[in-house]
Structures are given as C-alpha cells and as structure tokens.
Image (cartoon, rainbow, N blue to C red):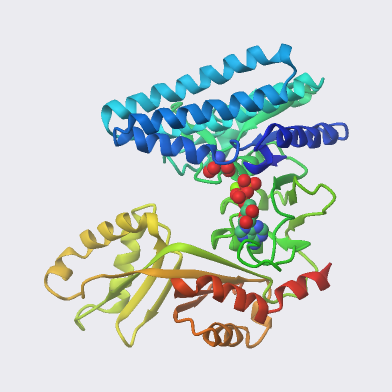
Amino acid sequence: MKFGGTSMGSAERIRVAAGICAAERRKRPVVAVVSAMSKITDLLLDTLRRAETGDQAGMDSNLSRLQERHVETCRELLPPEKQEAVLAGIHSLISDFQRIANGVLMLGERPPRSVDEAVAIGERLSAMLMASYLESTGVRSVAVSGADIIVTDAVFGNASPLMGPTREKARRDLLPWIEGGVLAVVTGFNGSAADGRPTTLGRGGSDFSASILAAVLDASELWIWTDVDGILTADPRLVPDAAVLGEVTYSEAAELAYNGAKVLHPRTLAPLIEKQIPVWSKNSFALDKPGTRIVSKTDSPGGPRAVTSMASVALISIESESSALSTNQLLARAMDAMARTSVEVLVLTNSSYRQNFCFLVRKDELPVALSALESELSLELAHGYVRPIEVDQNVGLLAIVGEGMRGTPGIAGRVFTAISREHINIIAIAQGSSELTIAVVVHRDGLEKAVRAVHAECRMAERAHRAE
Ligand code: ADP
Ligand code: ASP
Ligand code: MG
C-alpha cells in the first residue's frame, strides 16, 4: 500500500491511511510505503535553495512551518500520553535537517548528495507519525527508512535501484517484520548507494519505492492510494469531464506516466512487469470507488484511451549547413552526446530533405543538453557546418495513448484536425514505435486547449464509461 502526499496530508488523512492498512492486514500481510505530507518536499527543497543564497530569514521561517505542521499533526493524531516521544522524534529529525541546511548556508552551495540526505526527512517524519498512530490503535507497527532497504546507484536526485542487493536487504531486514505480524511503514522516495550515501528516486518517487518493494518481496498486489479515482482519461485539473479507466495495461500506464500523467511516477511499472504483479490506483478520499487496475492484458477494444501533457519542455533543433555532414551523422552524434548525460529525449523527429531534426527535452534538463551538444559539435558549429542550435521553449507536449491504436485508422488525422480547429500551431509529431502513443508538440499557449480538443474528439470519456 503506497500513500501519496495528500493521502498523508493531515492527521485526518493519516488516520484514514492507517485504517486502510489495518483493515487489509486482517486479511493478508501488508507493507505501507509513505510519501512526505503534501507540499513538505517542496518546502524542504525551498529551504535548501534559500540556504544556498544566504537567505537565513527565509530559511528560518520555512523551518518554523515545517515544525508547526508536524507538531500540530502529532498533537491531533495521538493521545496525549503518546505525544512526548513522537514530538522528541520530530525535533530530532528536524534538527538533522537544520544541520544540513546550515551547512549549505555556510558553503553557499547545495551538493546533490546533501540535498538527498536532507529531503529524506520529509518521508521519515510522515512514516514516524503513521507508525506511531498505528501502534496507538493497537496495531503493531514500525517505521522503516527506505534508505536501509533500497540500494541504488549514486545518481543523486534520480537514483536507480540495484534490484539484487535490494532484494537481499528487504528479505533480511523487512521480511522478518512482516512474518512477525508487524506492519512496516517504509519511507518512500529514498534509498542509499552501496556505500551508504543517501539517494532519492526522483520527484514523485514514492510510487517507484513501492513498486521496487512489491517486486523484491514478491507481493501479490500493489495498491497506490492517491487523491483521484484512479487513472483518468486526462488530468482532471485540465479536463473536468475526464473519466476513470477501469483497466489499463502496463504499457499504457507506463506511456501515460512517461508522457506527464503525474498520477504515476514514470518508472513505477518496470519492476512489476516481469512478475506481472497487478497494480491498483485508488482514491484514499473515496474508498468506495473501485479505482483503476493495471494489468498485462485488458479486454479493452483498443484505440485512443487517454491524453496527457507536459508543459515544461523545450524543443532543440539542429540543422546541417553542409552536404559533407549528413543528417544521419549529425543525428547520431547528437544522440550520442545525449546518451552521455542523463537527459531524456522525449520526442524526436527529422527531415532528411531539409537536413534537420529536432527533439524535445525537459526544461530543467535543457542546460545540460545544450552544453553536451555544443561541446560535441563545437568544431562544426565554429566552422559553420552546422547552423547555430535553435531552442524553442514556448512549446508543450501532448500524448495520446492507447493499446491497439494501429488498428484504428485515421486517428492521427482526427487528432490534427481537432487541434488545428482550435487554431493551435502543431510544431512536431511523432508516433512511438510501440504504436501505443502519438506525441504532438504544440505551441505552449495552446497546450491545455489542445488536450481538451483531443479528449473530446476521441470521445475518451464516453469510451471509458462504455467500457465500465
Ligand atoms: P500523490 O501525492 O498521491 O502521489 P500526485 O499528485 O503525484 O499524487 O498524482 C495525482 C495527481 O495526478 C492527480 O491529482 C491529478 O491531478 C494528476 N493527474 C495527471 N494526469 C492524470 C491522469 N491521467 N489520471 C489521474 N490523475 C492524473
Ligand atoms: N515526497 C516526494 C516528492 O514530493 C516523493 C513522493 O511524493 O512521491 O517528490
Ligand atoms: Mg505522486
């Protein structure tokens, strides 16, 4: 059972989450994985940024907010006689964070490994609160740090798990709790490198923590509790009439997540596919709703099922100026340069006739992408064999996802017509080789409108309702 930030957002929500775990535990063993309380990770990161720029006042005010939120929650959650020990625990974790923040303040620098160590505090606070509450209601429970179980590489801020060593640790240090009937509440988002240095799995990474643990513990199911009714045909914040999908395949869910559906961390499904562990996405605010089941095969008739979008992206265009340098050569070298960085190429299209190609990256990865390209192509750029690299930051990505879209003729055409009808500029199009996704890059201003237009044109809500 994984509980996201909103599902852990207050004493009331923690009670509900604990209740869900306790009820299920009467039927079968349960491990809980928790996120930090909502907005806490943002607050911790903001505090470190302020520390880096020497903004001591801002840092102190953030620290008070951090303290207040958890102290208040603790007082609301626990009976008075249980509060003292937990309040001491809260103070001690916040002092650890403060120590790191002071280090950042003094150095004027935010080393990624210190950031990872510091932000882990958010999940450690929420796990402690949940485990203490469970104990206070008579459910034997223990808070476990994900850093003691999940072994990762040393890519701070976006680490990848080492499944073998993680399995060993989970079997050695987590399984005995489960077998002993103790409900372990594990902190999501954090792990540690083989040498013990703390790491994190990327923003939203608690979903990934839960799927890693589900895989290494051979779980029968993974339930991801969030604040919407499951996986919807679109982000309900953009498309109010988006409908819940009863079932989606691992591939569909992964495509949706990779193309911006925040409801799942992109890497969540990979560890589960091999063992075919089913996943449920459920609403902790509406326990009667069935949620979405993610499985390897569904009965869905196929065709476009959901649309996602990403706003913070940038399009990089590269064009050869000389026939001595073919588009293929240029493309190979550019992609090679990207491969040496951690930059993810989201969409790529090319024109051999015009000797150019363009690809999409996340805005926060743009500086790394550009410096890698400029150093790879420095000579060609200097001698004018390659035109100056162009960047368009005023774009957005939209992706239409559905198993079996190949079998639905005319989809691409309908999508383009629907977007053009809204007078939105289409900048690039790509159909994934999996034929599961059509990606469209549009002018940023039209992104939300384009999402709504595509959702309506493909009748996604109606199709989802009909499949129910
Ligand atoms: P949690 O804190 O539980 O991990 P997130 O905020 O990370 O929750 O993810 C849930 C949010 O994802 C929803 O509130 C919703 O706005 C957003 N979202 C984006 N696309 C979708 C989609 N296709 N289906 C459901 N939710 C989506
Ligand atoms: N708390 C972390 C974040 O906000 C991880 C998560 O919520 O999944 O990114
Ligand atoms: Mg999330």
Quarter of the rendered image showing ligand 1: bottom right
> Could you say where residue 335 lies in the image, as x and y percent from the top left?
35, 64
Residue furthest left as drawn: 383
Where residue 32 appears, as percent x and y from the top left, is 70, 34
Q: Is residue 356 visible?
A: yes
Residue reaching furthest to the right: 27
> As drawn, is 379 to the left or to the right of 347?
left
For the N terminus, which image quadrant?
top right
Q: Residue at x 73, y 11 (%)?
A: 81
Q: Is residue 200 visible?
A: no
Q: Nearer the viewer, residue 372 or 304?
A: 304
For residue 50, which quarter of the picture?
Answer: top left
Q: Is residue 257 left or right of residue 15?
A: left
| Quadrant, the C terminus | bottom right
The answer to which of 223 and 169 lies nearer the viewer is 223
Residue 114's quadrant in the figure?
Answer: top left
Residue in the picture at 38% in, 54% down: 364
Residue 444 x %, y % = 44, 71
x 36%, y 38%: residue: 49
The image shows residue 404, relative to residue 174, as above or below, that is below
Q: From the viewer's perspective, is 401 left or right of 297? A: left
Please name the residue shown 53% across and 40% down the image. 161
Q: Is residue 47 above or below residue 268?
A: above
What is the count of numbered marks?
A: 0
Residue 21 relative to residue 109: left or right: right
Q: Nearer the viewer, residue 375 or 281?
A: 281
Q: Percent position (x, y) of residue 403? A: 68, 71
On screen, 211 above or below 398?
Answer: above
